[in-house]
Image (spheres, rainbow, N blue to C red):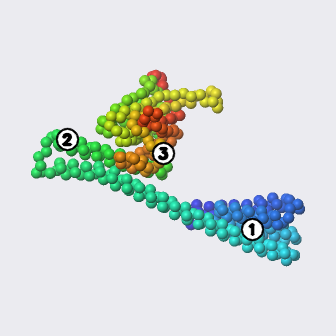
Amino acid sequence: MDKLTLKSAKNQYLISFLSVAAVSFSCLIVRDVIDYKIVGYLLLVVVSLLAIFLEIKPVLLGAVLSALALNFMFIKPYFTLHIDSAEDILLLVMYFIIALINAVLTNNFRRMQRAIQVKQTRASTLKLYNTLLDSLSHELRTPIAAILGSIDTLQQKNVNLSEETQQKLHNEIEKASMKLNYQVENLLNMSRLESGYIHPKLDWCDVKEIIYNVCDRLKEETKDHKITYTIDDNLPLFKLDYGLMEQIIYNLVYNCAQHTPKGVNINISAKYEVDADYDTHIDLIKKCVITISDDGYGFPPAEIDKAFDKFYRFKESKTGGTGLGLSIVKGFVEAQNGTITLHNAEDGGAVFELTFAVDCLPINSLGNE
C-alpha cells in the first residue's frame, strides 16, 4: 500500500470518528429534552451517510463508535457501559446489528454501482473504438491505397510514362499524403482533448494572416469552390493560440469544402466587436468574431444539435469522414474560452460563428510597442 493510499485510509477513519463525535456531543447538549431513541436514529443516519461516501472499514468503525456513544452518554446510568434495563440492552443490541447491516448493505450497493459504471464505460469505449475503426478503415485505407498504387506505377521499369502522367501521379501521392496527415492530426488532437493536455499558448495573433494561410493550404480541396473574405481592414491583433486557431479554421473550411456541392461560395468573415459590460457599467467586453458560412444545403434540422458530437456522421452525408473535425473545433474553441454556434441560414447553407472574448492590440499601436 503506497503512502497516498495510507493517507486516504487514515483520513476516512478520522472522518468517521469526527462525524460520530460531532453528532454525539451535539445531542449531549440537549440530552435532557430529547429521548435517547431519537439520538439512536440520528446516529444511524450518520452511519448511513458514512456508508455512502467511505469504505467499509471506516464505516464499521463508525457503527461501533455510535453504539458505544449511545450507550455511554445517552442510556442510564450515564457515562458507564453498564445498562440496568433489559429493554435498553435489547434496543442497543438491535441498534448495533441494524447499524452494521446498514453499513454493509450500503457499501455493497456502492460496489455494485461502481461495477455497473465500469461495465457501461467499457461498453461505451468499445462502441467508440468500433466506430473509430469503422471510420478509419475507409478514411485511412483510401489515401494509403492511392499512395501505394501511384508509387507502384512509377516504379515499373517496363512502362514508359510521360512527364505529364508522372506529374499527375506525384500530385496524387501529395493529395493522398495530405489527406492522410489530416486524419492523423485529427486523431492526435482528439487524443489531446480527451486527456486534457490542451494548454493554449496565448500570444498576439493576426487572425487575417491565419485565415489566408489556411486557405492557401486548402487550395486543392477548395478548387471547385469560391472563397470570399469579409475582413475588417483595421482588424486588431488578438491574444489567441496561433496553432489552435489554424486547426479551427482549417477544419471548418475543409468541412465546408467536403460537404457542399461544387461551385458553392464559402465566405469567411472576421471582425472586432466591443460590448458594454452591464454588470460594471464601465468596462468593455472586447470580442473577436469569426464567421464561416456557405450557400450550400445546410445541415439537417433534426441532426444539427449533434454536429459537434465525436464520431457523428450525418445520415444523408455522401462523403466519408471520421466525424472528428467539428468536435475538435469545439474543443479547441472552448480551450480558449470561446464559444461556437451553428445554424442554417434563411436562404440556405450553414453558418459557423466563433466568438472569443480576448485582449486585443490595435495595429496602429504597434509602432509604439
Under mark 2, the amino acid is Gln
The label shown at residue 174 is none
Within 10 angstroms of label 2, few (less than 14), some, or many (20 or more) residues?
A: few
Out of 149 and 314, give the one closest to the viewer.
Answer: 314
Displayed quadrant of residue 80: bottom right
Residue 208, position in %: x, y?
41, 30
Q: Which residue is mark 3?
A: 302
Tell me which numbered mark, 3 or 1, is placed earlier along the sequence: 1
Q: Is residue 121 visible?
A: yes
- Residue beneath the point at 47% across and 46% down: 303
Q: Using the numbered discs, state the Cα–Cα distance from disc 1 to disc 2 in whole angstroms.
A: 84 Å
Q: Using the numbered discs, state the Cα–Cα distance from disc 3 to disc 1 in whole angstroms.
A: 58 Å
Left or right of residue 31: residue 300: left
Give the answer, above or below, for where 331 lies relative to 29. above
Question: From the viewer's perspective, is the residue at label 3 or at label 1 nearer?
Answer: 3
Q: Which residue is mark 1?
A: 65
Under mark 1, the amino acid is Leu
Residue 215, position in %: x, y?
35, 35
Tell me which numbered mark, 1 or 2, is placed earlier along the sequence: 1
Q: Which residue is mark 2?
A: 167
Question: From the viewer's perspective, is the residue at label 1 or at label 2 nearer?
Answer: 2
Residue 65, position in %: x, y?
75, 68
Give the answer, above or below, for where 313 lies relative to 102. above
Tell me which numbered mark, 2 or 3, is placed earlier along the sequence: 2
